[in-house]
Amino acid sequence: MGYASYMKRPVSAFPFFLRRFRGLCCTMVGVSLLAGCQAPMATVKITPTPTTLIYSYIIAHGMARGRVMSGDLAPQDVIRLAQADQMALLSVLMAEKEPSRKNFQEASRNVISFLEDVKQQN
């Protein structure tokens, strides 16, 4: 055994067709990832659903709770947050009970207003 026998490339444990299949799969994954970059942005449409509205309300409610618990809000600010919280909750529940475009828009508007009130208090 000479020096040249150590220079040979080791044989893979995969059979020939599986090595080719693995290479083909990697190529296809790469091409599909690059093809996803070419998708137009207009195809992505986010519409509010009762679930997303509820999640948004719960997050905003938690933020408001934390703000009130910090103890540095004036009484009128606490009242304003409580009113915005109640309006957002009622509109989200209405959108879930009677799903219509008008109710979704109203709930979205009230949750956004509630978030702005929480943000304004910071």
Image (cartoon, grey):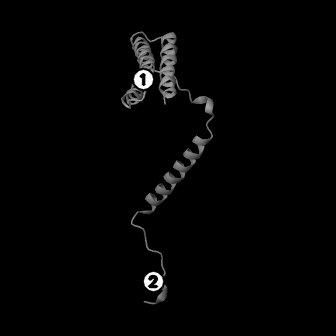
Return the disc, 1 or 2, that comes first in the chain's sequence. Answer: 2
> Label 2 amino acid?
Tyr
The structure residue drawn at horizontal position 39% and vertical position 11%, both measured from the top left corner, is: 97
The structure residue drawn at horizontal position 45% and vertical position 62%, both measured from the top left corner, is: 16
Answer left or right for 64 relative to 30.
Answer: left
Q: Compared to 115, does 38 lie above or below?
A: below
In which quadrant is the N terminus drawn? bottom left
Q: Which residue is mark 1?
A: 57
Q: Which residue is mark 2?
A: 6
Secondary element at tag 2: helix
Q: Foreground: 69 or 105?
A: 69
- Please tell me how crowded label 2 is: few (under 14), some (14-19), or many (20+) other residues with Cα within 10 Å: few
Instruction: Give the number of callouts.
Output: 2
Residue 27 spot, x, y in % from top left: 54, 53
> Label 1 amino acid?
Tyr
Cα separation, mark 1 vs mark 2, equals 67 Å
Residue 19 spot, x, y in % from top left: 46, 60
Q: Compared to 66, does 75 lie above or below?
A: above
Outermost residue to the left: 69
Q: Nearer the viewer, mark 1 or mark 2?
A: 1
The structure residue drawn at horizontal position 40% and vertical position 15%, both measured from the top left corner, is: 86
In terms of image quadrants, where is residue 39? top right
Secondary element at tag 1: helix
Answer left or right for 53 relative to 41.
Answer: left
Q: Foreground: 46 or 64?
A: 64
Residue 41 spot, x, y in % from top left: 62, 33
Outermost residue to the bottom: 2
Q: Compared to 78, does 4 lie above or below?
A: below
- Please tell me how crowded label 1 is: few (under 14), some (14-19), or many (20+) other residues with Cα within 10 Å: many
